[in-house]
Image (spheres, rainbow, N blue to C red):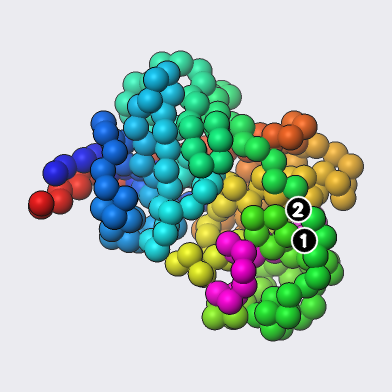
Amino acid sequence: MEMNLYQIDAFASKPFEGNPAAVCPLKTWIPDELMQLIAAENNLSETAFFVREGSGYRIRWFTPTSEVDLCGHATLASAYVLFNILGYDKEKIEFDSRSGILKVMKDNDLLAMDFPAQPPVDCEIPQKIIEAFGTTPVECLKSKDYIVGFEHETDIESADPDFEKLKKLDLRGVIITARSSSFDFVARFFAPKYGIPEDPVTGSAYTQLVPYWANKLKRKRFKVRQLSPRGGELTCQLLGKRVLISGRAILYLEGRIRVET
């Protein structure tokens, strides 16, 4: 069995920044177990698989350890492959997913993803978060992940959490965030229980962060930077119950997977 493989740097305007994702276009679905093995072999935070269904595509995402319900940067990477490599000639792609219909549009040199908003709600700060970061944050909310607010941008830059403690939390991961002097806000994302100690740029995190910051700042448009070692920039907009998440992407690698059966 052979299939094409593309590695795309998402939320990046040049190689070696943003978040790398593997993309495997398929003609028909292959066994779940094989997709998981391929994702583990790729050893990137996400590998996306998609199949043409009707006028759109069905998309699935796998970390090195498990399938997930939503992934932003691998969706952006998949749209890049369709628009720029596979000759998709319409202005909008619709992906059907575990999280519903996800739309990706061309916006000049940007790709804009239309995702459902996932507004967080207030919660008590889990003791494991305090222990993992060695300090008590300003506030804590939860949605798909814990959203942990800190007072200063430097708190985000210098954070060095204990991943073993974060693994014991009940939600997918932890997003830390603060106001910024150069951007509207900054963030970092940790999901060690899914095999991702720190994700370079996390599109799905902004379905939670944008409603959070829209409520705090009383505005709907944001310019954002994720402060991972690779780093990446996004523009985001709250549109009612949807979030528009925009960024660039670039091809890093193109190859073939060969699996002996």
Tell me if I can see residue 80 in this picture.
no
Question: Quadrant location of the N terminus?
Answer: top left
Q: What stretch is highlighted in magenta?
A: 166-183
**Residue beneath label 1, please?**
141
**Given the image, on which type of amino acid does mark 1 rest?**
Leu
Relative to 6, residue 193 above or below: below
Res 120 label: 2
Q: Does the magenta stretch include residue 12?
A: no
Residue 170 falls inside the magenta stretch: yes
**Labels 2 & 1 near each other (Cβ < 8 A):** yes
Percent coordinates x, y for residue 220 in the rendering: 80, 37
Q: Can residue 151 be seen in this view?
A: yes
16 versus 194 height, above or below: above
**Snapshot quadrant of residue 4:** top left
In terms of depth relative to the viewer, which is nearer, 68 or 195?
68
Extreme residue in the top direction: 90
Q: Looking at the image, which residue is at 42% across and 38% down? A: 59
- The residue that appears at 58% across and 62% down in the rendered structure is 172
Determine whether, in the image, residue 175 is placed left or right of residue 172.
right
Q: Within 10 Å of the Cα at label 1, are there few (<14), some (14-19), or many (20+) other Cα atoms? A: some
Towards the viewer: 55 or 249:
55
Amino acid of disc 2: Pro
Residue 5 in percent (x, y) is at 27, 43
Q: Residue at x 21, y 40 (%)?
A: 3
x 53%, y 60%: residue: 199
How far from the left and from the top, in percent, is residue 107? 58, 24
- Residue 4 is labelled as none
Can you tell which quarter of the image residue 101 is in? Answer: top right
Q: What element carries label 1?
A: strand
In terms of depth relative to the viewer, which is nearer, 170 or 195? Answer: 170
